[in-house]
Image (tube, helix red, strand yellow):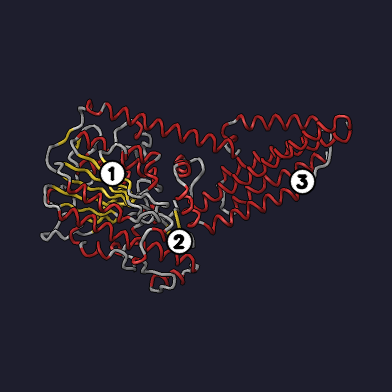
Amino acid sequence: MSLINTNFKKSLLFGILPLILIVLNLLDPQTAGKIAIYSLFCAWFFLNLISYLSYQIAQNHKFSPQIKIAKNIFKILFFVLVVSILFFISFEVALRVIFGVHQDSYNVMSAIFGTDLAETSEFIGQYARYLIIFSILFILGCAFYIFVFSKTQPHNKKAIVIVLGLVFVFIHINPTMRKINTFFYFYKSYSEFVSSSNELANLKDEISSNLQSLNSVKFTDEPNTFVLVIGESDTRYNWHLYGYGRDTTPQMDMIKDELLIFKNATAAAPNTIAAFINIMTNANKNNPDAYKTSPDILLLAKLGGYKTYFISNHSTDNRSIINVFASNADELILTNIGHSRGEGSFDDAVIEPYEKALKDNAKKKFIIVHLLGSHPAYHFRYPKEFSKYTYEFSDEVATKLSNEGRAKYAIAFRNLYDNSILYSDFIRTKLLVRLMENKNGRKSWLYFSDHGQDVSHNSNFSGNNYKSKEQWYVPMVFWINDYKRLNFQNELDENLSIKFDTRQIDLANINHTILGLLNISGDYYDEKLDIFK
């Protein structure tokens, strides 16, 4: 039993590691517990199997070649298992530390499988520090395995091998525990991702083909141009318009008296895929699957007689769920055709097709513009002439961050991010001014971001932090050429000087406001969720 106990003690190391990570707040208890149980029994089984085969080699010399081969095969499988467990732990820790999410999220898989090589390279550049740390820990873990587990002593306890073998099989039969195996997890996740994307595409095709039969949809024939601009990774806490200490929104500041500025707008979701699902359809936090059965705002706009445009500077908008929605537009224009989402083209690439859309003679136009905004890596998001806040730049904001204990690299990330906000302000304002210059009919313009970003606001970390208010509170700005037509609670003064609107706005329901601005009503429109009603 001493040898069996030795194998158990070695296996226990795998069970203890996830529990240590709980104490360090690097893994959530539920995930850590499953990893601990899975790795403990799997390691214990393989160590005892290898020990038993070693005993057979020592006792049965005639069959030793075959047994040696079997032993070596199981040693390789054990090593693969160890690497798989360590990789999975590193993967889980990285998701928790960098993004604050859990690996079971469908949106995590959408982000992983919906990306491209260029976006991956930008991700590596943005989070290189964390990835290096996790890679070093992973390598050290593998080295520790070689040192501790490479030597096994023979024993002839066949019963324990059989029992643990059954446990090993049972663990993989159980779907919850099977996910801990890296190979099963990624294969299953990818299969579900493909299946869900295909299912959504088929459902949207079916809805589109039956669109004319939706008699419950009501609309008017009034000339109308509505522009929806969706930003990326843009938090209101870095807008001067909202009181930030740096002059990051000089263009919007100059026309602020013509704007309705929402102070308490919260993101539809803390990540792009989920946010778009909620923005484009009736899906929301209480009914997340509604997007599978209801038409999106582009389809409803087409039914209402609008010519629709979807103009995007995201190279990844040609795949996955966003492309399913975008493809419903009459005109789908992807402006970023370079080698990287930021290096290939800045957001000014959307201006030309946008101006062309405004000049279209269609009586009713609905134009969606999806900007790259401040998506990491920040330094790819703006041309050099907008590099106002450099590494050496010092002001009250930088001093405050330094006094709060932020590292120099964290302040550098804030500088890069603020440059991207400054450039986006230039692009946003140009889009709005171009619409203002158009004199025909009713015109309205709405901007908000899909989600925010925590850029050294709470620690040295920069990126998606689902627990921070900076990730959730986003800027939301509205303009219309005739505010008196709106029916909403706040009274405007005689000079139409617009002040902050302090209502709580959940952008998960913004599709109803969009439909209202398009003069579309019916079964898919809820007037109670329209902020202008």
Residue at screen point 25% across, 49% down: 353
Q: Nearer the viewer, residue 326 or 284?
A: 326
Q: Is mark 1 on a helix, strand or loop?
A: strand
Sequence-first tag of 2 and 3: 3
Residue at screen point 12% across, 51% down: 482
Residue 116 rendering spot, x and y as whole percentages: 45, 46
Task: Point out the image quarter for the N terminus.
Answer: top right
Residue at screen point 29% across, 33% down: 295
Residue 513 rendering spot, x and y as whole percentages: 24, 44
Residue 254 rendering spot, x and y as whole percentages: 21, 65
Where is mark 2, residue-wise? 458
Category of crowding for the residue at label 2, using alpha-carbon neighbours closer than 10 angstroms: few (below 14), some (14–19), many (at least 20):
some
Residue 310's mark?
1
Q: Is mark 3 on a helix, strand or loop?
A: loop
Sequence-first tag of 3 and 1: 3
Residue 429's mark?
none
Q: Tell me if residue 282 comes above or below residue 148 in the rendering.
A: above
Q: Which of 494 and 293 is in front in this view?
A: 293
Q: What amino acid is at disc 2?
A: Asn
Where is mark 3, residue-wise? 150
Distance between mark 1 and mark 2 Cα atoms: 35 Å
